[in-house]
Each structure stands twice: as C-alpha cells, then as structure tokens.
C-alpha cells in the first residue's frame, strides 16, 4: 500500500499543477477551483492507477521469479540495444522528412526493434552468458538453492527417462546442473565415441526441453577439488547446498549409505514403475469361476487383480493352481493377468494366439 499511496500523492500534485495551468488566466477564485478539481480527479485516478500497477508488478514478479538471471540480463541488454538501434535508424526521418508523424514512426520502429532484441535475449540468454563467461558469476549460490531443488548428475541427464520425468514435473520445479556435469556433457557430445556422444547430445536437448516446459534449470558453480571425479564434485556441491541428487549411476546408488546425501535412483524408480507381472513369471492362484470365453477359468490375486487362465475350465474350484504369466492388460478397474496353467505348458503355442480374443470377454467381467 505504501507504493500506491506515494504514487497517488505524485499524481495528486501533478493534478493540482495541471489545474493551475489550465486556469492560468482566470481569477484567483477560478484558479483555486481549477486546482481543487485537478486534485480530486487526480486522487481518484492516482489510486486506481497505483493499484493497477501494483497488481501488474506482482504478476510480473511471479512470472519472472523462476527465470534464470542470465536470461533476464541478456533480454534487458539486447532490448535496450534494440531501442537505441531503432532510434538511430530513424534519424534520417528527422533530418530529411521533418514532419509531425516522424515521432510516432520513430517510436514504433524503436519499440519493434527493442522487442525483438528482448525476445532474442530471453531465448538465447544461456548461450550468450556462456559466450560472455557470465555463467559462473550468475550461477546459484549457497543461500539461493530452494529446498525442493534436485541436483542431476551426468548419468541422470543422459538417461532416456530424464526428459519424460522432468517435463512432466516429476523431478520438481527446479533442477540444478553443476558446472562439472555441464562441461562433461559438452565434452562427451563432441567426443569420438558415437554412443556417448549421442546420449550426451540427447541429455543437453532434454535440459533445454525441460526448461521450455516451465521447469527452472540452473547451472551451479562451486569450488571443488580439480582432481576429483565428476560424481564426487556433484556430491560435494549437493552436500554444501543441502539438496538431493538424482542419478542413474549404480555406483552412486551403492554408496548412498556411506555418502549421507539423499539420493533419487532413477533406475530403481523405473523398476518400481515396471509392470507388476512379467511374461514367464509363475503365480499361484485359486480358480473360482468360469471365464467368458470357452475353456477359461478366472481367479484373483491377493491385491484384487483378476487372473484369466486359458484351458483351465476343468480346474475351477481348485486352490493354489500354478500358472505362467503370458501378458498383462491395464484397465480402469485394475490389472488383468493372462496366464496358462503350468501342467498345460505343452499346449501354450496353440493358446497364446487366443489372448486377443480373450481380452473383450475378460474386460467385460471387471
């Protein structure tokens, strides 16, 4: 409210001066009336204008809060240069044309060029800062890391699941990439190994795609031993900032207890998200009723998932029937497991082809 009231006071003073200026040739009473009207009108306009500016500033603050400092700086610099360039381009108008419409034309050109500079600076801020060696100066410091931020090591960025999880927001709203990791990714991307080069380029592209999806991606600088491995540097920076590390390195995951730093193991995470039952897995189920298709029997796992067993209608009512999983199908009501009784394994070749026909009947039973 202090901002609004101060702005209102400035507008009120301006309104009084405008009222006095308009009634300059009037009597003293007329000038007082003009100043009073100017003050009253300016008081209303100043309050409304101040509140509008306050709301717009709050909205801009929320939108700009997650933008990297490099992008803001690059956008401001190129935007200002664009405005100056637009004004310089329009100098011939004032020299040769000398008309009243020179000013709006010059303003329009300066605004367009300045806006283009702002857009280019915002979109290419990271590359421009790297070229100007500003990344280290503008990188996040010890006190600036958010509590919910995640630090990604090289193995995580190069993992094919990193883009999917990051773009979906499952890795949080801020991802920190240490400078040693960024340097290693660039080195691998330009290296002779075609597999590592392809994976590193994919990782760099994934970081850019995640950033464009609205997740803050920040390059983190830090003083770490030069002779240390990249993983050791990442862990040292993460320990100093007090953030978790996301990794796909089996070695880092193995050392988690000794490291003492919270770690998100992407390999373990993806394993947990894998299907509950894989083809060839053996299950034991009680067959309780017939299925919709001929020779089918239906049972249920302890977690409630339905099991459809081919060529087992004659075993309905038996408990603990051993089956081999053929496939699984997710439905809106749970998972359907298709299987084959173990003692009928010699006939599996003739039954697997019926799985697609069993699907409609099994789904209708849910």
Image (cartoon, rainbow, N blue to C red):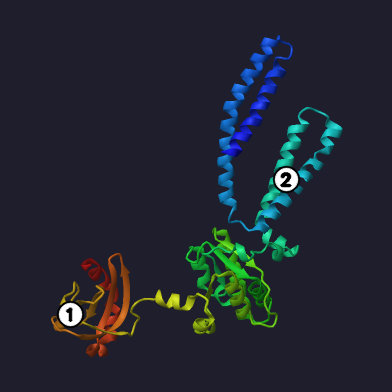
Question: Is 14 or 62 nearer to us in this picture?
Answer: 14
* Element on which disc 1 rests: strand
Neighbour class for label 2 at 10 Å: few (<14), some, many (≥20)? many
Residue 30 locus on image (x, y percent): 67, 11
Total numbered labels placed on residues in the image? 2
The quarter of the image holding the C terminus is bottom left
Is residue 311 rendered to the left or right of residue 10? left
Using the image, tell me which numbered label, if any, was put on residue 297. Answer: none
Q: Quadrant of residue 142?
A: bottom right
Q: Is residue 125 visible?
A: yes
Give the position of the N terminus as an image quadrant. top right
- Residue farthest toward the right in the current orientation of the protein: 95
Kindly identify which numbered label has been placed on residue 287.
1
Q: Position of residue 195 (x, y in %)?
A: 60, 80
Check disc 1: other Cα within 10 Å, few if <14, some if 14-19, many if 20+.
many
Q: Residue at x 83, y 29 (%)?
A: 98
Q: Residue at x 67, y 61 (%)?
A: 126
Mark 2, secondary structure of its residue: helix
Q: Is residue 149 above or below residue 328?
A: above
* 309 left or right of 210 in image: left
Residue 310 image point, x, y percent: 23, 80
What residue does disc 2 label? 113
**Foreground pick, 9 / 359:** 9
Q: Closest to the observer: 158 or 339? A: 158
Q: Distance of mark 1 from mark 2, alpha carbons? A: 75 Å
Tell me, yes or no, if residue 124 can be seen here.
no
- Give the mark nearest the N terminus, 1 or 2: 2
Q: Are marks 1 and 2 in contact (CB under 8 Å)?
A: no
Q: Position of residue 323 (x, y in %)?
A: 25, 85
């Amino acid at each position: 409210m202090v901002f609004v009231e101060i702005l209102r006071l400035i507008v009120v003073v301006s309104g009084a001066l405008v009222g006095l200026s308009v009634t300059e040739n009037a009597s003293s009473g007329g000038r007082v009336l003009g100043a009073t009207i100017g003050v009253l009108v300016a008081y209303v306009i100043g309050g409304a204008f101040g509140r509008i500016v306050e709301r717009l500033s709050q909205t801009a603050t929320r939108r700009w809060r997650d933008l990297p400092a490099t992008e803001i700086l690059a956008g401001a610099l190129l935007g200002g240069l664009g405005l100056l360039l637009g004004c310089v381009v329009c100098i011939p108008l004032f020299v040769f044309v000398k008309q009243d419409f020179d000013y709006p034309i010059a303003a329009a050109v300066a605004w367009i060029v300045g806006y283009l500079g702002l857009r280019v600076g915002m979109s290419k801020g990271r590359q421009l800062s790297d070229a100007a060696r500003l990344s280290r100066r503008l990188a996040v410091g010890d006190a600036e890391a958010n509590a919910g931020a995640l630090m990604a090591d090289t193995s995580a960025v190069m993992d094919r699941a990193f883009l999917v999880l990051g773009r979906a927001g499952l890795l949080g709203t801020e991802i920190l990439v240490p400078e040693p990791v960024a340097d290693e990714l660039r080195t691998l991307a330009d290296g002779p190994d075609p597999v590592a080069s392809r994976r590193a380029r994919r990782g760099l592209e994934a970081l850019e795609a995640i950033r464009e999806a609205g997740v803050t991606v920040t390059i983190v600088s830090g003083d770490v031993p030069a002779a240390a491995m990249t993983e050791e540097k990442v862990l040292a920076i993460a320990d100093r900032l007090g953030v978790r590390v996301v990794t796909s390195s089996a070695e880092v995951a193995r050392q988690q207890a000794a490291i003492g730093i919270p770690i998100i193991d992407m390999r373990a995470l993806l394993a947990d998200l894998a299907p509950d039952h894989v083809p060839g897995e053996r299950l034991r189920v009680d067959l309780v009723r017939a299925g919709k298709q001929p020779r089918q029997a239906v049972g249920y796992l302890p977690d409630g998932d339905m099991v459809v067993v081919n060529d087992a209608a004659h075993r309905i009512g038996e408990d603990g029937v051993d089956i081999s999983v053929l496939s699984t199908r997710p439905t809106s009501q749970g998972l359907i497991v298709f299987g084959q009784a173990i003692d009928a394994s010699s006939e599996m070749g003739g039954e697997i082809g019926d799985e697609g026909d069993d699907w409609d009947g099994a789904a209708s039973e849910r």
